[in-house]
Image (cartoon, rainbow, N blue to C red):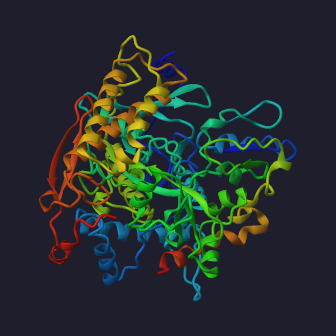
Amino acid sequence: MIELISAARCTGCNICVAACPTNVFASSLSGPPVIARQADCQTCFMCELYCPEDALYVAPTAGAPLGLASEADAPLPLGTYRAAIGWTPATAANRSVDAMHAVLSAK
Amino acid sequence: MGFSSFAPSGLHLTCDVLVLGGGPAGTWAAFEAARTGARVVLADKGFCGTSGATAPSGTSIWYVEPDPKLRAAAIVSREALGGFLADRAWSARVLETTHAALHELGARGYPFPVDGAGNPIRVSLQGPEYMRLMRKLAKGAGVRILDHSPALELLVDEAGAVAGARGIRRQQGDGWQVDAGAVVIATGGCAFLSRALGCAALTGDGHLMAAEAGADFSGMEFSNAYAIAADFASVTKTLFFKWATFTDEAGEVIPGAASNGGRSVIARHLQKGRVFARLDRADAAMQANMRAAQPNFFLPFDRMGIDPFTDRFPITLHLEGTVRGTGGLRIVDETCATRVPGLYAAGDAATRELICGGFTGGGSHNAAWAVSSGRWAGRAAAEFGRRAPNGRVRRGAGTAGLRDAGARPFDPAEAARTVVGEVHPFDRNYFRTEEGLTRSLDRLDSQWARLTASAPADGTNVLRAREAAAMTAVARWMYRSGLARTESRGMHRRIDHAAADPAQRHLLTAAGLTEVSVSHRPAPPLAADAAEQRSSEGIAA
């Protein structure tokens, strides 16, 4: 479930509010959006991908939050998934990396 | 505040085609319709580009080069698994249309990987990349997209033709109404609030709306797909468990447990205790391929500090219902029309029996179906919608949770819990019996009666109420169809009728809301070569 919005990284662009398919966030007039409906999070990681500042961290547990209080609690740096799929300028080459054909053709 | 109170202050639009749902089928339908010059509105419950089962994941896709031998082999290869219910002509159409669509995707910027000779490999799609592009293509073609705008009911005219829909804009707190010439239902399947990845919004809403307008269903008994996942996680990728060893609490290997052909063994074991997996049969090269194929599969493991190739981890089975089942709205012709004039269906909301029969595994066939049915439905809806007469008188077709009067308050959470309790358990849905299905139907039927006699849900509850009503209706079509098919065929598995019955190689139509009726119609004619391999019937997956 979504657990963290880093106040240090968030620019208040509210892209996550728009992009979340289950309407978990609410925008606030000043500062970062808030995780207003955490129980509705489907742990799909899409908000992380759409955050241009890598300000979000989705904990991997789908049933209940882990209780992460700050960015320092996250076991991995923020933004690893976005980098992996090639949605950062530095990793754009990853967009065309897809070895599914090798997995599918394995005996 | 009732639903009707949204309408006056909301958004009111007029167009030729309204598409409900913004996944692959919906975006292809909208894109295709808009390209013909039609005015198109697409309303998504969430955000077009991230919502639905495809966006957060990756999917293989049924893509076969236009070599007649390869195409024929691809079509025949899954016939037995699907219980010989698929239609070869539809399969051939889907392969043709999907092929053309994927070439177009590449030309429009989808970054397909390339082989050693530099040729694109088009057998899979990365969800985030694919759906971001589809949103862009739809917008570029002039489609007006309404995000976070779930539809609540269809609008019908005096003649019973579908003429638009109404819903809410949940981030604006008001409503919308779109007067349209035709409507495409592309709202996905129904996964009953299980934790399967991307399925939270897939609650059968489109099925309910379509049924209220008079549409019927086919193949609803093929609705008991369960996918393997780590028990703490949402990410389902059953394919990768082909490389797993399954063990019990004590670490003993569970005989017969497997991702394919042994998932029922896992289900049986999960009824008694925990089941663990370790992907220890993947060598180093395959491990690297898996990471490069599906980065999202590894997110839960990496973030929990688990190496799935060397560590044992507990697993579960998430219900995927009709998402990976093959039942849905019945298609009456090659335009993907339903039996209601002006109403078309595409993607997982429609039956996929036409190409899958009674069984789908991973995304491949469903992904190809979403593309193809989306294109056909979009084009046909545009033509129908442009010809629709002006000045039609429209009324809302919605029932439960919207306008059926009664004093009893509608409790959406309680209603949802009741449905989930009848469809998630393996001993009800995976391993079906006459007794179990009948008992569930008693509860589901009385719940439907109760919901339609309740007071309309208030403003903030109305979406949840409609979702609960939709899940109740879908479960009733599923189980009435499952009761009528007294055999095991495709993914439908009857404990009390363990074998396939050659006399039941037919298709089931389910219809109705107050009373659900099931009737059968002939399956497509069996080709001579298929008749020969029918001895393999009864081998359940």
Left or right for B365, reference B68: right
Residue B295 placed where, x, y %? 64, 65
Left or right for B366, reference B511: right
Q: Is residue B106 visible?
A: yes
**In the picture, which quadrant includes the C terminus of chain B?**
bottom left
Q: How many marks?
A: 0
Compare residues A52 and B529 and report the one nearer the observer.
B529
Q: Quick one: which residue is furthest to the right in this view?
A: A8
Left or right for B190, reference B140: left
Q: Answer above or below: position of B407 versus B349.
A: above
Compare residues B364 and B131 and report the one nearer the observer.
B364
Q: Quick one: which residue is furthest to the left in this view?
A: B503
Q: Is residue B341 visible?
A: no
Compare residues B261 and B330 and report the one nearer the observer.
B261
Residue B113 placed where, x, y %? 59, 76
- Kindly identify the residue that appears in the image at 48 percent across and 17 percent down: B2
Q: Quick one: which residue is furthest to the top in this view?
A: B407
Residue A9 placed where, x, y %? 85, 47
Q: Answer above or below: position of B176 versus A63.
A: above
Q: Quick one: which residue is furthest to the bottom in this view?
A: B117
- Kindly identify the residue that appears in the image at 20 percent across and 50 percent down: B485
Quarter of the rendering containing residue B73: bottom left
Left or right for B237, reference B447: right
Q: Answer above or below: position of B524 versus B175.
A: below
- Kindly identify the residue that appears in the image at 39 percent across and 59 percent down: B264
Residue A32 placed where, x, y %? 80, 38
Compare residues A20 and B134 and report the one nearer the observer.
A20
